[in-house]
Image (tube, coloured by chain):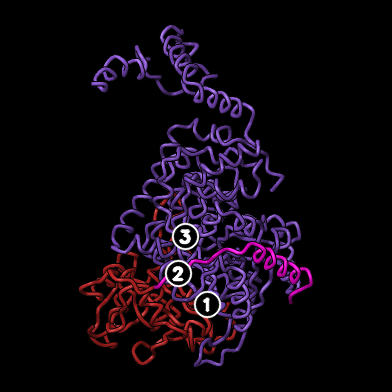
Amino acid sequence: MTDAASTSSRQAILDRLRSRPVTAPPLPDLHPAGLVAYDDPLAQFCQVATSVGAAVHRIGSLDEIGPILEELPPYRDARTRASLLPAAVPGNLDLASVDDPHDLASLDWLIAAGDFGVAENGAIWMRTAGVRHRASFFITQYLAIVISAADIVPHMHAAYERIGSTIEQGFGVFIAGPSKTADIEQSLVLGAHGCRALTIFVCGEA
Amino acid sequence: MGALPIVEHPAAAAKFVANRERMAWHDKALWFVREKRDRMAHSLPEWEWLRETASAIKQHTIAALPEYLEQFEAAATRQGAHVHWAADAEEHNRIVLRILEEHQVRRVVKSKSMLTEECHLNPFLERHGIEVVDTDLGERIVQLRHERPSHIVLPAIHIKKEEVGDTFHEHLGTEAGAADPQYLTEAARGHLRDKFLAADAGITGVNFGIAETGGIVVCTNEGNADLGTSLPPLHIACMGIEKLIPRARDLGVFTRLLARSATGQPITTYTSHFHGPLRESDGPEGSGRTSGELHIVLVDNGRTRIRDSQEFRPALGCIRCGACMNTCPVYRRSGGHSYNAVVPGPIGSVLSPAADPAAHQSLPSACSLCGSCTDVCPVRIPLHHQLLAWRRELASRRLLPASKRWAMDAASQLMRHPRLFAAAGWLGRQALRITPRFLVYNRLNTWGRRRELPEPPRESFREWWKQNRESQSHD
């Protein structure tokens, strides 16, 4: 794919950089003292996730998800639902059967499992591993994510520590609240291009 | 770039400043964002440690840039991405066009990228018959109005909702006179969903490139980058060479700073990590069948030149959060368009003269040296020191306009000759006392505009000192 011009630009850029050596200060250590600590990271996670627009439900078991969703009009009225936790909540669309991601345009709900939550910002780390189309997470009108109450890390340093080298396995995304914009006069509007609403289920005890 | 007319900042700001009500509205909107940023910064005891560490990581990376670029290229290639190198904007545009043409692409959805603005990619692709749709809501508004973004994070911050309503009425068929942000955003969502579904390729910028893993990170609130790269099979990521960070775990520092500094959010809604192209059933468990292509275009376009300069090198650490704009008293009251530059505000006033000193010579003076930008910068770029350094640099290159040069020369003479200084002070005090109002408060004297000049004192400080203190100090 790389043509001759790009190759010579590569060399020109590297030559130019090397013709001006700059002494590099060492890469700083990332294990500081005095990082923010939360007495109750789970409570902090729930509070911040709510403040960035998510609806958070603490549940004791996965069986509680269905009844809570049934209370929500957009869920009751939804025509197309996909579930990656079919044992807990059944869906009516098998994502693996969809050949073209464009056919997901009519997807109303996706119920998925998150890896872990981050207390300081309410974000959830999501892998698209095993899901046929990455677009499912972004094209769905409504998104519900289930995480375990035991899977909360305090901050982003701990988050990347936990992700480790698995970050190299394709695609991963932190999702914090529903998609949003404030591009019109700084008025916050939920539901920009991604999900209109995000429902988080935190299952079990920390 | 050379085609842009050379306009001095005060002249370009005149129109914006003339509407005092609108100026106050703009000022307030940005200060509101600045206050949100403060609340976020104060919520973390380690905030200053984060800034210091971010600055150190960036300085380290910029110094060792050739090694990290090679490491990034090798790792990204291993991940299945195609890496391209562009020396300047023109080459960047040609590479992007070639990739698009090779894939017979007619329609492109683009998420926010200041680099593609810098390279003027949209008009270039449009000239070659490719439809480019900006999908960030603010950028789409600006695009439909044939304007430029006035802010790097809030592209439409200068536009009122009624004006957005008019634009959407014309282009998207919304109700005439409708100006409710919720309603207008919903209309844009529908309009842009169609564009996402019809696109043959997605173009994104890059917030961070990870040298060690060859991955790229893109941060958005709207989810537009994610939709634009998961529906069409082709993803082109345009990235300035200064966007690299060495390790994945360095992201812990930058993702904590970026959104807090930019909009006062704890993190952007979507922080997406791409390693390799679109795959079906991604990850170790899945089959990982590649269903798309990822092309990463590394762009210099003057960045190596900035790196050459000891003085301005730290500016390459910029993570494009826009905090310096939100806090800048000049930016808030003159609007982003007054800078006539792709990146406005304090950081733009440092970067733009590096690209074209003659065209942007007035920008380093669009600054009161208050230092607020330096205080909020998440990577601790000494912005106001750099703006002062640019003034010195531009003066020594004789790039200042004649009026400013004469005034500076005169001031320099005055400062160097105490007797002359005293005489001029006396003359000024007498003159201000007896000069009729119309001679002081007119169009020619900018110091008399919109302000009352102070009562001229009877005596100078030196005279006062002589009478009141000098005798005592000799006691």
Residue drawn 54% across the image and 41% down it = B364
Asked whether disc 2 touches disc 3, contact meaning CB atoms under 8 Å apart, the reply is: no
Q: Quadrant of the C terminus of chain B?
A: top left
- Say which amino acid is labelled 3: Glu
Q: Position of residue B412 (x, y in %)?
A: 54, 27
User: Which is closer to the viewer, label 1 or label 3?
Assistant: 1
Q: Which residue is mark 3?
A: B186
User: Which is closer to the viewer, label 2 or label 1?
Assistant: 2
Judge the density around disc 1: few (<14), some (14-19), many (≥20) Cα neighbours within 10 Å: many
The colour one sees for chain A in the rendered image is red
Q: Which residue is mark 1?
A: A135
How many angstroms separate mark 2 from mark 3 (CA)?
19 Å
Q: Which lettered chain is shown in purple?
A: B
In the image: residue A62, left or right of residue B437: left
In the rendered image, the residue lying farthest to the left is: A39
Q: Which residues are magenta?
A: A1-29
Q: Which secondary structure, mark 2?
A: strand
Q: Which secondary structure, mark 3?
A: helix
- B374 in relation to B329, above or below: below
How many angstroms separate mark 2 from mark 1 (CA)?
13 Å
- Say which amino acid is labelled 1: Ala
- Per the rendering, the mark at residue B439 is none
Q: Mark 3 falls within which chain?
A: B
Residue drawn 51% across the image and 60% down it = B317
Residue drawn 68% across the image and 65% down it = A13
